């Protein structure tokens, strides 16, 4: 899923935002421990070869940039080896599976001579980036409240087999997989957090059947095996937020939300307006503000178009009504990272680095500590 999307993003990264400005991207290799996955991605996306051992990528003289899109527990070891080999690294979120590993990766970045980044790709959604622009410009007045949900159903079926997503301590399940995205968006849209509280973590499906060969990440593929293995982490999480600005917020995430394949939505409310983004309708935002004349106030649909971030020159049909998808945000992210590596300024905000990923892990840890304390308030003072 995410690995194939990264493969596609690198293929398209040089086709947008003044094509020809950055050096041509040569698609060298796809590596996966399961050879059929790597071989299929190579054929599908036009890469030169397939590998099954990540160390071959570290040793490869013809690879300059690497996306790490593997189980969280492998991020640190692979990143350290790649950086030592002089390769630029874009790592998927969450940055690592432990605070210690995330801290080590942030320290690695601080002393690295290469570009490193963390994949919080929703920052590249034109609708969400437009909301951030509106908040910064004061278009909504003073922001008072944030509400975010990220509900998925990839784990709703109890016969979906065990995989790395279901292993690890509480806080590394739905909170790490989905909550990391929506919490990052809360800060992206409303500024830094100062505390979390009221956290609840729950495991709804406590056992899953073992995985068969070729099952990818515990999404979608079912098995009829009679044996079962325990689920170690959270299926859903709820918590409240307080921002440095004084605004408050709430977040709900779930990987067992029946009928919700990828339901990410945010609401930002202010003293002079309110705006909503729903991933199911990614080509628009819902806006209510003081602009309409008396008697005509109310929520209205505003289509994503060339006045929104990323969309102009980031789409081959850059006009309102065309719409965008989650795949597009990976392409925008890859181009921004490529610009950083090549030293080209196309006006794209840089990809957040490992230090940002470490902060996100510490916020995740604060939420876990709130839940362990019965929902108590935990300060975010870093």
Image (spheres, rainbow, N blue to C red):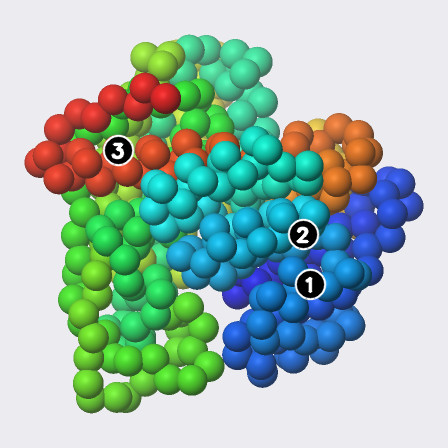
Of label 3 and label 1, which has the lower sequence position? 1
Say what secondary structure mark 1 lies in. Answer: helix
Q: Is residue 255 above or below residue 248?
A: below
Number of residues whose C-alpha sits closer than 10 Å to that of mark 1, classed few (under 14), some (14–19) or many (20 or more): few
x and y percent of residue 16 in the render? Answer: 80, 46
Q: Which mark is residue 156?
A: none
- Residue denoted by label 3: 366
Tell me if residue 63 can be seen.
Answer: yes
Q: Which mark is residue 85?
A: 2
Q: Are marks 3 and 2 in contact (CB under 8 Å)?
A: no
Say what secondary structure mark 3 lies in. Answer: helix
Task: Give the CA distance from mark 3 to mark 2.
Answer: 34 Å
Left or right of residue 215: residue 84:
right
Q: Name the residue furthest left.
A: 374
Task: Give the CA distance from mark 3 to mark 1.
Answer: 38 Å
Task: Give the CA distance from mark 1 to mark 2.
Answer: 7 Å
Q: Is residue 325 above or below residue 333?
A: below
Q: Are marks 1 and 2 in contact (CB under 8 Å)?
A: yes
Left or right of residue 327: residue 27:
right
x and y percent of residue 373 in the render? Answer: 10, 34
Q: Which mark is residue 59?
A: 1
Q: Residue at point 69% right, 63% down?
A: 59
């Amino acid at each position: 899923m995410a690995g194939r999307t990264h493969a596609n993003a690198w293929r398209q990264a040089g086709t947008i935002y003044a094509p020809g400005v950055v050096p041509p991207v040569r698609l060298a290799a796809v590596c996966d421990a399961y050879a059929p996955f790597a071989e299929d991605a190579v054929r599908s996306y036009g890469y030169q070869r397939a590998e099954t051992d990540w160390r071959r990528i570290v040793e490869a003289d013809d690879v300059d940039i690497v996306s790490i899109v593997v189980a969280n527990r492998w991020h640190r070891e692979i990143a350290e080896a790649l950086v030592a080999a002089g390769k630029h690294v874009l790592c998927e979120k969450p940055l690592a599976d432990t605070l210690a590993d995330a801290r080590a990766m942030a320290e690695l970045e601080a002393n690295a001579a290469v570009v490193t980044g963390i994949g919080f790709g929703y920052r590249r959604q034109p609708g969400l980036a437009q909301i951030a622009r509106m908040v910064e410009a004061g278009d909504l007045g003073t922001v008072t409240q944030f509400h975010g949900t990220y509900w998925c159903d990839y784990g709703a079926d109890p016969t979906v087999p065990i995989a790395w997503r279901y292993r690890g301590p509480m806080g590394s399940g739905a909170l790490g997989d989905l909550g990391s995205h929506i919490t990052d968006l809360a800060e992206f849209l409303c500024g830094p957090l100062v505390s979390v509280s009221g956290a609840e973590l729950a495991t709804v499906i406590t056992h899953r059947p073992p995985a068969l060969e070729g099952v990818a990440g515990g999404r979608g593929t079912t098995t009829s095996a009679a044996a079962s293995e325990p689920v170690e982490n959270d299926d859903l999480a709820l918590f409240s937020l307080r921002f440095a600005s004084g605004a408050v917020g709430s977040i709900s995430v779930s990987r067992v939300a029946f009928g919700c394949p990828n339901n990410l939505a945010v609401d930002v409310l202010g003293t002079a307006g309110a705006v909503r983004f729903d991933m199911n309708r990614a080509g628009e935002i819902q806006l209510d503000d003081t602009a309409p004349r008396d008697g005509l106030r109310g929520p209205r649909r505003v289509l994503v178009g060339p006045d929104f971030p990323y969309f102009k020159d980031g789409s081959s049909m850059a006009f309102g009504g065309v719409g965008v998808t989650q795949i597009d945000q990976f392409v925008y992210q890859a181009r921004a990272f490529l610009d950083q590596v090549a030293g080209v300024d196309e006006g794209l905000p840089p990809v957040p680095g490992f230090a940002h990923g470490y902060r996100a892990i510490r916020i995740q840890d604060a939420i876990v500590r709130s839940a362990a304390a019965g929902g108590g308030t935990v300060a975010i003072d870093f």
